[in-house]
Image (cartoon, helix red, strand yellow):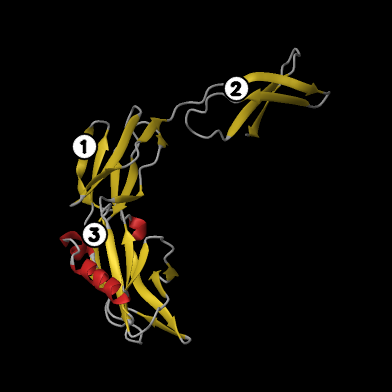
Amino acid sequence: MEMKQNMRIRGLLLLLPPLWAVLLRDIAALTGTKGTGTPIKLKVSQGQPVKLNCSLKGMEDPEMLWIKDGAVVQSVDQVYIPVDEEHWIGFLSLKSVDRADAGKYWCQIENKGKRKESQQVWLIVEGVPYFTMEPEDLSVVPNTPFHMACAAVGPPEPVTIVWWMGDSRVGLPDISPSILNVSGINQSTVFFCEAHNIKGLSSSRTATVQIKAVPFPPLNVTITQITSYNAVVTWVPGFDGLSPLRSCTVQVAEPQEEEEVSIEVVPV
């Protein structure tokens, strides 16, 4: 009965469809020594399924672990199939790869206190660019130069940045990272950037650049306490003109024939 079961499993492995055969990579048989050599590179597109396998011969009922970048893989999509009593194949399935799945994978077993590892597979996930820096909102003085920054990465590289001001493209395409130098604006304007590679494009957040203005007068100016020598004045700051308030000026006048006015700058 056991021999028939192994035969059925062996037949299953031989009848795998072509897609599986393309995505399935034999990491190398565990031979009792740590795998050496350059990792096998496997490039896949973001969102595609990937299946890795690891073959082990010469041990009965081994405890096999999948490792990614030095940590044990906790995925439930792991299967271990006996081909015969001393030949096992382990499978790791990634149903829809993302950038977080990129890294180096290998098999590991513990046998009589010794750790044995297979050769590594370096999984490279390719997709549309991913932004590492996006344009930020600004407040500027009218007709004064300023700049904005944008950066994105692959893989695949290179990544080209295209800038937009409102509905119009500005400047020339630039290899990431990119700095857009603006000579000045006199009204509020929006900016964003696009990142292009051979897989497609991504659009950044939209940044709003507003024009600074003169701050409004304070509101609800009230004297809350007064003595012969002191007075406590409170107020609510008005619109700051898109620039942080640094100080307010308080003027005090005594109702005498010869009025004396004192001026004091109060930090906000």
In-image side of 131 versus 70 (left or right): left
Disc 2 element:
loop
| Foreground of the two, 79 or 141 | 79
Q: Nearer the viewer, mark 2 or mark 1?
A: 1
Q: Which residue position is annotated with label 1?
A: 169
Q: Residue at x 33, y 78 (%)?
A: 118
Tell me the kind of residue under disc 1.
Arg
Q: Amino acid at mark 3?
A: Val
- Please tell me whether residue 46 is drawn above or below residue 87 in the rendered image: above
Mark 2: which amino acid? Answer: Pro
Q: CA distance from mark 1 to mark 3?
A: 32 Å
Tell how many labels: 3
- Judged from the image, the secondary structure of the residue bearing numbered disc 3 is strand
Task: State the mark number for residue 218.
Answer: 2
How far separated are the C-alphas under marks 2 and 3?
61 Å
Residue located 62% across and 28% down the image: 249
Residue 216 x %, y %: 53, 22
Q: Is 162 positioned to the left or the right of 211 in the image? A: left
Q: Is residue 119 visible in this depiction of the protein?
A: no
Badge 1: few (under 14), some or many (20 or more) residues near its Cα, within 10 Å? some
* Chain-order first, disc 2 or disc 1: 1
User: Where's the N terminus, which quadrant?
Assistant: bottom left
Quadrant containing the C terminus in the rendered view: top right
- Is 76 positioned to the left or the right of 267 in the image? left
Residue 79's disc number: none
Write the residue at 74% across / 18% down. 254
Q: To which residue does mark 3 refer? A: 44
Label 1: which secondary element: strand
Disc number lying in front (1 or 3):
3
- Mark toward the viewer: 2 or 3: 3
